[in-house]
Image: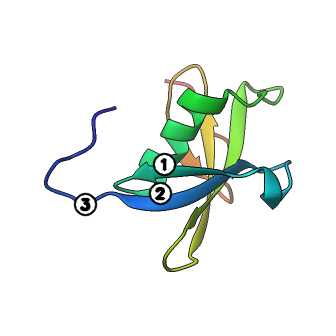
Amino acid sequence: MPLDAARPTRRFSVHAFQEARGRAWLMEGVSFEDAALAFLDACHPPPDADHQVSLIVEDCDSGEQQCFRVDLDTGRTAPCDESPIPSP
């Protein structure tokens, strides 16, 4: 996914939900979701039974954290606390 040239990139720390924070990767992106998808492209963490991956994304400047579930079949994302990602 190309970065939007009009929006500045930020640094994020990203790791799989089930992994320790010390295993995080530094990723750049224009948003939390963008950083989560960049992490998937680079790291390929193992999916769960529903072929989804849960990721913790932290903004390196503000410390704000968000959790995303990503459906590896469709690329759709949802916050971790929502119901499962519906199939199209």
Q: Residue at x 57, y 39 (%)?
A: 39
**Residue topped by disc 1:** 35
Q: Is residue 22 left or right of residue 58?
A: right
Could one spot residue 86 in this view of the protein? no
Along the line of sight, the residue nearer the viewer: 37 or 10: 10
Along the line of sight, the residue nearer the viewer: 88 or 32: 32
Quadrant of res 42: top right
Q: Residue at x 34, y 32 (%)?
A: 1
Three-letter code for the amino acid on which mark 3 is drawn: Pro
**Residue topped by disc 3:** 8
Q: Residue at x 21, y 58 (%)?
A: 7
Three-letter code for the amino acid on which mark 2 is drawn: Phe
Q: Residue at x 54, y 45 (%)?
A: 36
Q: What residue occupies the far left of the structure in this picture? A: 6
**Residue topped by disc 2:** 32
Q: How far apart, in angstroms, are the residues tagged by discs 3 and 1?
A: 13 Å
Q: What residue occupies the far bottom of the structure in this picture? A: 62
Q: Secondary structure at mark 1?
A: helix
Q: Residues within 10 Å of mark 1 (few under 14, many from 20)?
A: many
